[in-house]
Image (spheres, rainbow, N blue to C red):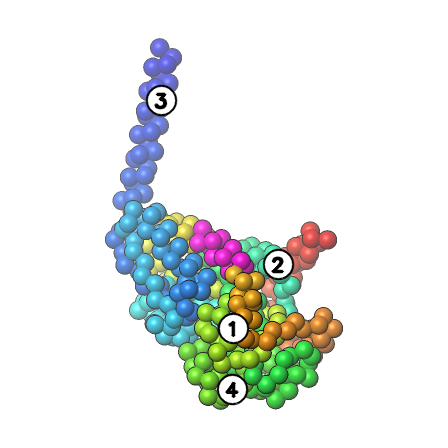
Amino acid sequence: MKAAVRHSAAVAALAVLASVATGAQAQVSERNIKFGYSVHETHPLGKGANRFAQLVAEKSGGKIKIKNYPSTQLGSETQMISATQGGVQDMVGVSSAPLVGLVKDFALFDLPFMFANEKEVDAVVDGPVGTRLFDKLATKGVVGLCFWENGFRHVTNNRRPITKLDDFKGIKLRTMQNPVYVDMFNTLGANSVPMAWPEVYAALETKAIDGQENPFVIVSTNKINEVQKYLSVTKHGYSPYAVMVGAKLWEKLSPAERTIFKDSCAEARDYQRKLNREEDAKTVAELKARGMLINEVPPEAVAQMKQQLKPVTDKYTREIGEDLVQQAQAEIDKVRSAMK
């Protein structure tokens, strides 16, 4: 008798689960989503986007199909952000710098030498600070799903190796269209040239500019080594990618669909970050093999640069909001204490 009761209870429980699953599936509509980003599809961001599309397809039972558009096919990062806000584009993955034009708080990631390692970054972007930043984006026509990794940024140029502060003098350096980076490199002695990414390779090739700054993998996948001789490991900044959905699309999604997007983004994030970090070391070796001259920057030179940039850091800390910077610094300090 007891066995029969247990069997009946198990059957009932399975029926409830099946009913819930059927109900959730019914909340998922057939959708074709356009996801644009600026880098080559072989970059870890591109591979992360492919994994994201795969996960969404699996979790939606094949109903939601995401088509990825790499290599600025849909425009520059600022153009894609605008298109996503307007509902012309559904999703976008962009570096944090262009988002400063929407929410000044994103300049937090541009503060010079803010982070020392990836653990510090993860604590900030995956914690309350990251949530706070995405909450502010929600009023700007885009909804943040999660942060992926672009990575620590380094300087390349054709004039000379950068091993000390004075080496920046006179270098025409392309920067993102971001006031913090413009001020940062002008303060270091370079001549900042704000420029959209699609224009950079040609500008380097024609020697209209001397250099640029980006993570290792961006340098490699965009073949910057073909038009640049020196790469200096400055690690002057860290840039995450924000993966976002247009608010107009988000409002149409059911709770089940929103969960699919969020869960898939988080799973793809873990894959993408791991891949990006594994590729960093390999990329440096590959760039050397292709003929780039790569140099480390001595700690004392970094300290001098940080001191030179203190007015820039102080200026943008005030603009961003000292409370946000302090909140981020508290998360960083927790990581540093745990690593001692």
Q: Secondary structure at mark 2?
A: helix
Position of 67 with respect to 42 (left or right) is left
Measure the C-alpha gap from mark 3 to mark 1: 66 Å
Disc with the residue nearer the chain's start (2 vs 1):
2
In percent of width and height, residue 325 lies at 62, 65
Measure the C-alpha gap from mark 2 to mark 3: 48 Å
The residue located at (69%, 56%) in the rendering is 336
Q: Secondary structure at mark 4?
A: loop
What is the crowding at mark 3: few (fewer than 14 residues within 10 Å), some, or many (at least 20)? few
Measure the C-alpha gap from mark 3 to mark 4: 73 Å
Disc with the residue nearer the chain's start (2 vs 4):
2
The residue located at (37%, 14%) in the rendering is 3
Q: Magenta residues, as a range? A: 267-278
Along the line of sight, the residue nearer the viewer: 270 or 225: 225
Q: Which residue is mark 4?
A: 209
Q: Which residue is mark 2?
A: 120
Disc with the residue nearer the chain's start (1 vs 4):
4
Tell me the number on the disc at residue 290. 1
Kind of residue sitting beneath label 1 = Arg
Determine whether label 2 and label 4 are within 8 Å by CB.
no
Q: Main secondary structure of the magenta part?
A: helix
Disc with the residue nearer the chain's start (2 vs 3):
3
**The N terminus, quarter of image:** top left
Kind of residue sitting beneath label 2 = Glu
The residue located at (32%, 39%) in the rendering is 21
Disc with the residue nearer the chain's start (3 vs 1):
3
